[in-house]
Image: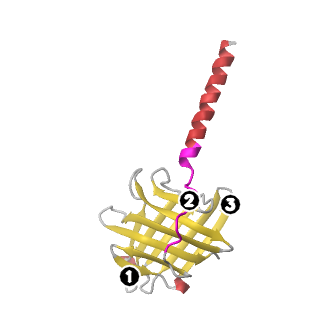
């Protein structure tokens, strides 16, 4: 009888811990405001300089598989520079941390393409540290194929010797 009580107590503790874990890892349901991006664009400031994608270089896609839904937003400007946002485990409107407990689930990157010598292109990715928050992506609207939201992140090159601070980001894109 004592062994059965111990087993029930352990099971209750396990389920309590799992509940706390699931609640702590849940996304924030408030996706915030939609930002300032014109329809079909991604805009941001990169180290204080304006970035604005052109419509033909901007896309968003959702793919659903066994592991859940992945959302990707890509914006490319006239110079070939690009911002790429990826949310694995996408669940709709809400705020998703880049980094922290989401080291591989939510990522962002900024790419500086050297059109004359593509091998000299630079990629800056987030998250880049161990456990620290590098930014967030907030989706404020996802209906009828229209996706709006905001983002910010700090990204690093592979050597962690060069960084880009991406702020005031927003997107207003059609999901393809």
Q: In the image, is 176 to the left or to the right of 44?
A: right
Instruction: Tell me how far mark 1 sits from mark 3, CA to CA.
Output: 35 Å
Instruction: Kindly indicate whether the residue at mark 3 contacts the one at mark 1 (C-beta within 8 angstroms).
Output: no
Q: Position of residue 75 (x, y in %)?
A: 50, 77
Viewer-proximal residue, 7 or 120?
7
Query: In which quadrant is the C terminus drawn?
Result: bottom right
Q: Position of residue 7 (x, y in %)?
A: 65, 22
Instruction: Tell me how far mark 1 sits from mark 2, CA to CA.
Output: 38 Å
Lower sequence index among marks 3 and 2: 2
Q: Position of residue 147 (x, y in %)?
A: 60, 72
Of badges 1 and 3, the one in the foreground is 3
Q: Is residue 9 above or below residue 107?
A: above
Q: In the image, is 16 to the left or to the right of 159?
A: right
Region in magenta: 22-35
Q: Which mark is residue 30?
A: 2
- Residue that carries the numbered disc 1 in the rendered image: 114
Q: Is residue 26 above or below residue 44?
A: above
Of badges 3 and 2, the one in the foreground is 2
Viewer-proximal residue, 48 or 129?
48
């Amino acid at each position: 009888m004592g062994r059965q009580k111990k087993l029930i107590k352990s099971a209750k503790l396990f389920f309590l811990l799992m509940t706390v874990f699931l609640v702590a890892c849940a996304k924030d349901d408030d996706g915030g405001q939609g930002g300032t991006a014109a329809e079909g664009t991604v805009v941001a400031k990169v180290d204080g300089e304006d970035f604005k994608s052109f419509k033909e270089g901007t896309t968003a896609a959702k793919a659903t598989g066994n592991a859940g839904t992945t959302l990707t937003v890509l914006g490319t400007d006239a110079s070939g520079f690009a911002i790429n946002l990826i949310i694995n485990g996408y669940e709709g409107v809400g705020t998703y941390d880049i980094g922290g407990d989401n080291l591989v689930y939510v990522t962002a990157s900024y790419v500086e393409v050297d059109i004359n010598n593509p091998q000299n292109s630079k990629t800056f990715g987030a998250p880049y540290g161990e456990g620290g928050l590098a930014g967030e992506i907030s989706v404020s609207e996802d209906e009828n194929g229209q996706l709006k939201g905001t983002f910010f992140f700090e990204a690093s090159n592979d050597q962690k010797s060069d960084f880009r601070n991406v702020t005031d980001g927003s997107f207003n894109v059609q999901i393809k």
